[in-house]
Image (tube, grey):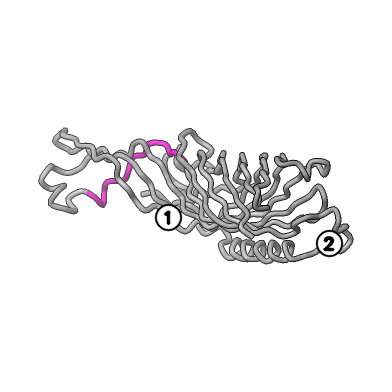
Amino acid sequence: MMRKKPCKNGCNHKMRFFTGLFVLCAALSFTDSRAQSAEIEGELAIGAKVGIGFSQFSQPGNVVAATAGGFVRRQFLPYLQAEGGLSFDLYGGGRADMDRDLGLLSGQSSFYGANGNISRLQYLNRQVLLHAAKAHVSARLELPELKDAPMVPKLIVGGSSSYIFRAVENHDSYFVFTDNTSIILSNQWENVGGDYDSFDFAVHFGFALDFKMPNGQIFSLEIIYEKGLKDINNIMVGQPANITELRVQRLGFNFAYTIF
């Protein structure tokens, strides 16, 4: 049986997560009294964002990633816009094939008994999907000379904190019995939340194109690369490929639209 890593300062991570949210809200509500109002248009904007892309751990194997949520933007300086937001994220990655300890499985059901005791069980083609709530903050940098252009390019840098509330694994189960017969069950799902830490932290950078719409709102296209800072693997004993550090990396394509 594989053992799992003890809690990695879960309480401290929770405190950091909610402290980060507080700092984010405070930053977005703070007004730079020294900025000249003539240089800053549309100081506050609220909108929605959706995205799709690719995600993987620090080992081979990609999964489709997705995000959906809301954001708040505030213009602090002619060249600096801050953005903060909350979103639901779906991401993950591939995992190496794994052999399972079968001591507790043999003879546990009529299915196994009818086919002989199991001598081996492998999980093949493994993919893990993480469901998370994420808070992010970004700096959006631009050239002030382009602020009145219909399309404004921007450089994006920032960080995020995620709470992983669900983890599921998709795999093919390959059974080998003591009488040398075997079967394979494809596309099996298993809840593996205990195998992964609940908190993740990441940095991101990318580019955006902001399009000014006729109604005064902004439509944005973003290309964002995100790199995890934290090992989220919670397994400490097992096959070498399954106890290695796991850090998430994502490449996403986002579509954002200001509503207010």
Element at label 2: loop
Q: Earlier in the sequence, mark 2 or mark 1?
A: 2
Q: Quadrant of the C terminus?
A: bottom right
* Picture coordinates of residue 77, whole percent (x, y): 82, 53
Q: Which residue is mark 2?
A: 32
Q: Nearer the viewer, mark 2 or mark 1?
A: 2
* Picture coordinates of residue 228, whole percent (x, y): 60, 45
In the image: residue 95, left or right of residue 199: left
In space, the residues marked 2 and 1 are separated at their CA atoms by: 43 Å
**Region in magenta:** 93-105
* Picture coordinates of residue 186, whole percent (x, y): 27, 39
* Picture coordinates of residue 158, whole percent (x, y): 69, 49
Q: Looking at this view, name the residue that lies furthest to the front.
A: 214
Q: Is residue 208 above or below residue 259?
A: above
Q: Residues within 10 Å of mark 1 (few under 14, many from 20)?
A: some
The image quarter containing residue 146 is top right
Q: Residues within 10 Å of mark 2 (few under 14, many from 20)?
A: few
Q: Which residue is mark 1?
A: 193
Amino acid type, residue under disc 1 in the picture: Gly
Q: Is residue 219 part of the magenta span, yes or no?
A: no
Frontmost residue, 37 versus 245? 37
Frontmost residue, 46 versus 130? 46
Main SS, magenta region, reads loop
Residue 216: mark: none
Identified at 88% across, 57% down, the residue is 36
Element at label 1: helix
Q: Give the mark count.
A: 2
Q: Is residue 95 part of the magenta span, yes or no?
A: yes
Q: Looking at this view, name the residue that lies furthest to the left.
A: 114
